[in-house]
Image: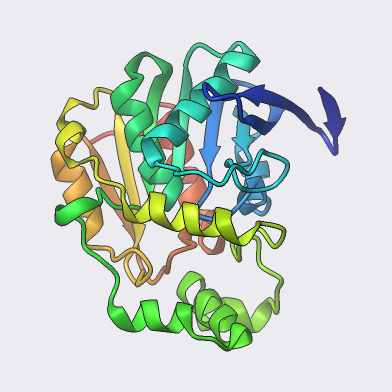
Amino acid sequence: MSPLAGIVTGTAVAPDGVRLAYQAGGRGEPLVLLSGQANSHHWWDGVRAGFEDAHRTITLDWRGTGASGKPDEPYTTRALAADVVAVLDELGVERAHVYGTSMGGRVAQWLAADHPGRVGSLVLGCTSPGGRHGVERDNSVRRALAQPDRDAAERALAELMYTPRWLAARPGPYNTAGDPGMPAHARRRHLAASNGHDAWDVLPGITAPTLVLHGTDDLMTPADNAPLLAERIPGARMILVAGARHAYFEEFQDYATPVALDFLAGRMHA
């Protein structure tokens, strides 16, 4: 392990032998922060410090991103949850809070369902149960992201993530724009993993206290997914962030981070 700007970095080994880069910093009860599709741990760069007075934050580079291995073979959100467990094992962390956003929220659902003893509490942000029960993004969103003009596609992604006011004040680059060093095969594998996610049948078995967070103006993962998750997971709470798009956790962090911290500390009451 080696220190980097206050963060301790290291490598874990997944069940199939893939090497997984992880990063840990801060102090307090462990909190795993899980990033979105085709993104490394840098997804959390603008937010992480807000959690580190209360928590030892743990991130990883998903397989296919950052300093992790990049095998060209099928990825699934369920298998990615096993990657998270491998990181916890390497760090000697028996039980952690988990905050997953976007694809990371899909992975977090499997983590809580398959490994209940490892999850103290669960925050699911801007995510979906997947499968036939999940609410899919509109085809116009898919077309905007898939257009051949890459500059236009990147602008479309930024506009799905952030409000015009945020974008006008911050010209980028953006932490949520994807890992620029990610190979094309890994991008395809991430997309397939996220699109293939379906945890509907296991959600009622999640026992960790759960908070569902979502921006009301999210078109990337429509906000109608939030009540589906909150109603399906026993005892889950839901909070919608007014006016926020997909990256609510960054643009609206002055609100969203304290809400998450209060929940993780058991200070949020019905």
> Looking at the image, which is closer to me, 63 or 106?
63
The image quadrant of residue 78 is top left
> Looking at the image, which is closer to me, 135 or 80?
80
Q: Is residue 269 left or right of residue 232?
A: right
Q: Is residue 48 left or right of residue 126?
A: right
Residue at image location 73% in from the left, 41% down from the top: 67
Residue at image location 40% in from the left, 22% down from the top: 119
Q: Position of residue 64 (x, y in %)?
A: 60, 47
The colour scheme of the drawn protein is rainbow
Q: Does residue 64 appear in the picture of this structure?
A: yes
The image quadrant of residue 48 is top right
Residue at image location 70% in from the left, 62% down from the top: 180
> Looking at the image, which is closer to me, 240 or 205?
205
Q: Position of residue 104 (x, y in %)?
A: 45, 45
Q: Position of residue 53 (x, y in %)?
A: 66, 32
Residue at image location 51% in from the left, 28% down from the top: 84
Q: Does residue 53 appear in the picture of this structure?
A: no
Instruction: Name the quarter where the N terminus is drawn.
Output: top right
How many discs mark residues in the rendered view? 0
Residue 144 higher or lower than 255, as above or below = below
Q: Position of residue 175 (x, y in %)?
A: 65, 60
> Looking at the image, which is closer to me, 140 or 44?
140
Residue 163 higher or lower than 195, as above or below = below
Instruction: Name the quarter where the C terminus is drawn.
Output: top left
